Amino acid sequence: MTKSSEIRVWDPFVRFFHWSLASAFFIAYFTEDDFLAVHSWAGYLIFSLLVIRLAWGFIGTRYARFSNFVYSPANITQFLKDTLRLRAKRYLGHNPAGGAMVILLIFSLLMTTSSGILLLGAEEQAGPVAHWFTQPVGFWGDALEGLHEFFANFTLLLVVVHVFGVLVESLIHKENLVSAMVTGFKHAKNNSIEEKL
């Protein structure tokens, strides 16, 4: 395919966000208590990336905007049924399931990082909210730790489902979605089922 048959779908910020977020998440996930400073800074980076991505979802480029990929539950369900039948439509941006995954990942990571910031303040008297915790927290510290670990593990599960979905979608439509998230370009047309431009 020639360059003229390709279209820029993912802008530089979306690509930077995607790969930086993935890297920071795995750094945070695998450092935990053993390297608390590294774990904390990776968490701060995740939180900062999420805040910027939320803003970019309203003011960013066409395919980065939430209005381009947030679909109704009925549309998401129908897309998943079509995918199981290998008849799902091709979307240049996020498909309905991919859009739902973006929202789930953002929510889960916000819960993970927020609970982590609170936990750092409660247990270590460190971080931006340390001044909130001048007394031993007891039950609340345990609750925060449980919440933080739950959402970290839930996020990991979402990442596994996301990667599986990318592979399935790449096979159905015979295109390399990982490469598209590196270069930013997708083929404007392919010979698969009707596309949403």
Image (cartoon, rainbow, N blue to C red):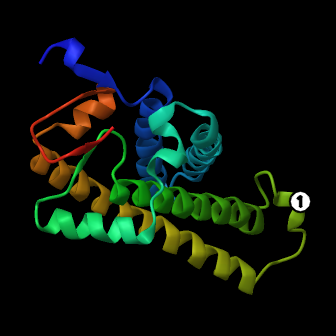
Q: Is residue 33 visible?
A: no
Please say if 112 is above or below 139.
above
The structure residue drawn at horizontal position 57% and vertical position 32%, both measured from the top left corner, is 60
The answer to which of 186 and 182 lies nearer the viewer is 186
The structure residue drawn at horizontal position 29% and vertical position 69%, both measured from the top left corner, is 78
Please say if 33 is above or below 194.
below
The structure residue drawn at horizontal position 60% and vertical position 65%, both measured from the top left corner, is 111
Where residue 53 appears, as percent x and y from the top left, is 58, 41
In the image, taking residue 75 as reference, residue 151 lies left or right, namely right
Q: Is residue 6 visible?
A: yes
The image quadrant where one finds the C terminus is top left
In the image, taking residue 77 as reference, residue 177 lies left or right, namely left
Quadrant of the image occupied by residue 139: bottom right
> Count of labels shown?
1
Quadrant of the image occupied by residue 99: bottom left
The image quadrant where one finds the N terminus is top left
Q: Which residue is mark 1?
A: 131
| Outermost residue, front side | 194
Dot 1 alpha-carbon crowd within 10 angstroms: few under 14, some 14 to 19, many 20 or more: few
- Give SS at disc 1: helix
Where residue 55 appears, as percent x and y from the top left, is 65, 41
The structure residue drawn at horizontal position 42% and vertical position 32%, both measured from the top left corner, is 15
Which amino acid, mark 1? His
| Outermost residue, bottom side | 139
The answer to which of 112 and 143 lies nearer the viewer is 112
Where residue 25 appears, as percent x and y from the top left, is 46, 50
The answer to which of 136 and 161 lies nearer the viewer is 161
Please say if 177 is above or below 82.
above
Quadrant of the image occupied by residue 29: bottom left
